[in-house]
Image: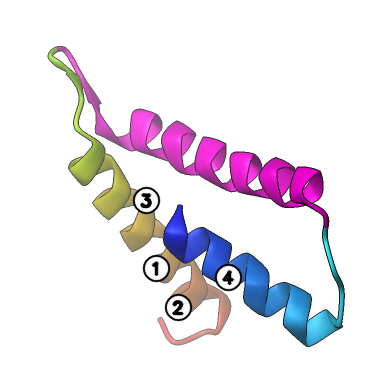
Amino acid sequence: GGVAVSGLEMSQNSMRLAWDRDELNHRLRQIMGNIHDQCVEYGASEQGVDYVKGANIAGFIKVADAIISYGIM
């Protein structure tokens, strides 16, 4: 969550906004919920959820999609 909060802080600063605690918590919960969902989607197995595997695959897909969208591949 710390990296996500830093990203939210940078967003606030660049847009010169000030979010209250409730707004910040709402945005952080959305981010962390999306991360969890992707880890479950890509890391699920019969033994449970491998969060490292799920996060790695989700990250790879995000980078691959960006490469494709820029026409690099």
- Give SS at disc 3: helix
What is the distance, in whole Å, between disc 2 and disc 3 at their CAs?
14 Å
Question: Which residues make up the magenta segment?
Answer: 20-46
Quarter of the rendering containing residue 30:
top right
Name the N-terminal-most of marks 4 and 2: 4
Q: Tell me the residue that label 4 is attached to.
A: 7
Residue reaching furthest to the left? 47
**Of labels 4 and 3, the one closer to you:** 4
Q: Amino acid at mark 1?
A: Ala
Q: Tell me the residue that label 3 is attached to.
A: 58
4 on left or right of 45: right
Rendered image: mark on residue 67? 2
Give residue 19's position: percent from left, percent from top. 82, 60
How crowded pointer 4 is (Cα within 10 Å; few <14, some 14-19, many 20+) is rated as few
What is the distance, in whole Å, between disc 4 and disc 3 at their CAs?
19 Å
**Of labels 4 and 2, the one closer to you:** 4
Q: Amino acid at mark 3?
A: Ala
Name the N-terminal-most of marks 2 and 3: 3
What is the distance, in whole Å, between disc 1 and disc 2 at their CAs?
5 Å
What is the distance, in whole Å, between disc 1 and disc 3 at their CAs?
10 Å
Residue drawn 25% across and 53% down? 56
Magenta segment, prevailing SS (helix, strand or loop): helix
